[in-house]
Amino acid sequence: MRTTGRGRSLAALLALIAVSGCRAQAVDAHGTRTPVRATTGSAAASDDAKPSAGSAVPGAASRDPGPTASRTPPPKVLWSRGDRGRDVREVQARLRQLAWLFEGPTGTYDFATVTAVRGFQGKRGLARTGELDAVTWQRLLSMTHEPARWELYAFGGQPAAPPDPRCMTGRVLCVSKTSRTLRWMVDGRTVSVMDVRFGAQYTPTREGVFSVNFKSRYHVSTIYHTSMPYAMFFSGGQAVHYSADFAARGYAGASHGCVNVRDEGKIAALFAQVRTGDKVVVYW
C-alpha cells in the first residue's frame, strides 16, 4: 500500500510522542490534534522548590539558638579610693555608726574607708569591691541615720567661722565656739587655722577678750595632774594647749575649761610665734 506524504508525517509524530512518554490524542478528520498534556507522576517543579511548612530543608540541622544570655551591668560606683569631699565624710560618718570605722571622718576616701566598705559589703552578701556603689549606698542608707554636724566632724576638719570684728587688728588668737576652731591672725590676716574643743557643761571655757599672760612648753596641771603641752594661759588656769585625748577621741570628750588643740604640729608652730601679751578672743 502506498502512503501519502501526510501519512508519513503523521506516523513520525506518533512515534515521537511515544518515545517522549506522552499520550497521543485523537486526530480529527482534518488531521488536527488536540493539545498534549504531560502525565508524569511527580509534582510540578515549581512545587518542589517550595518545601512544605512541616518539611525540613535537606542537609540543614535544626538549630534553636534559644534566648541570648544578658549580663546584668554592675551597679554604678559613686565614690572610691582617692575621692574627697562632704559626701565622702557622710559615708564615713554612717560607717562609724555601724562600727565599721573608728577614726575620722576625714573627708578622704582612704585605705581605712576601703577596708570598712569591703567589710560592710561582705557582711551583706554584696560584692566585696571596697568601692561605694549605688547598691551598697542604698543598703547603708537603710541601716543608718542622717549624720548630725558633729558626727561629720567628730575628729575636726570643719570650716572655720568668720572672724569676730575684735580679731581684725593686732596679733590675736581668735577662738570660735560656733565652729570649734582657732584662727591665729596678724593684722586681720589669717596665718593658721586649727580644730579646738572646750570645757564641758560644768567647766565651761570663758568667753571674752583676754591676753596671753604665761607660756609653758611642758606644763602639767596642778589641779588635775594632766599634761598640758604648749600651754598659753589667758584666763586664770585656762589655757590654749595640745591635748592627746582630743587627738585620740575627738569631740567625744571635753576639757576642764581649756582650749584643747588636736594637731600637735600646728600648736607647736603656734607656740613658737605667740608672745606674752598677744590678744585672745573667745566668742560664739
Image (cartoon, rainbow, N blue to C red):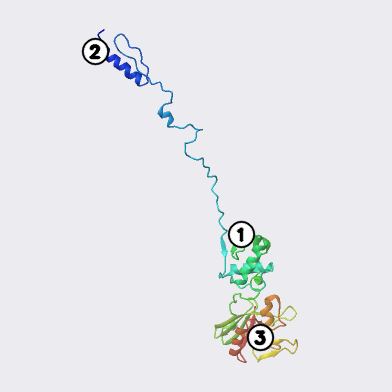
Q: Which residue is mark 2?
A: 5
82 vs 119, left or right, is left
> From the viewer's perspective, is residue 160 above or below residue 279?
above
For the N terminus, which image quadrant?
top left
Residue 116 drawn at (x, y percent): 64, 68
Q: Nearer the viewer, mark 2 or mark 3?
A: 2
The quadrant of the image that shows the C terminus is bottom right
The amino acid pointed to by label 1 is: Val
Q: Which secondary structure lies at badge 3?
A: strand
Q: Are marks 1 and 2 in contact (CB under 8 Å)?
A: no
**Residue 97 placement (x, y as % from top left):** 68, 68
Q: Nearer the viewer, residue 224 or 274?
A: 224
- Label 1: which residue? 135
Residue 214, given in percent of the width and then of the height, sits at 66, 92
Q: Residues within 10 Å of mark 3 (few under 14, many from 20)?
A: many
Decide: is 252 above or below 172. Answer: above
Q: Secondary structure at mark 1?
A: helix
Query: Badge 2: few (under 14), some or many (20 or more) residues near its Cα, within 10 Å?
Result: few
Residue 270 horizontal/vertical position (percent)? 60, 86
Cα distance, mark 3 to mark 1?
45 Å
Q: Amino acid at mark 3?
A: His
Disc nearest the viewer among 1 and 2: 2
Please tell me whether residue 77 is drawn above or below residue 53 in the rendered image: below
Q: Which disc is residue 241 wearing? A: 3
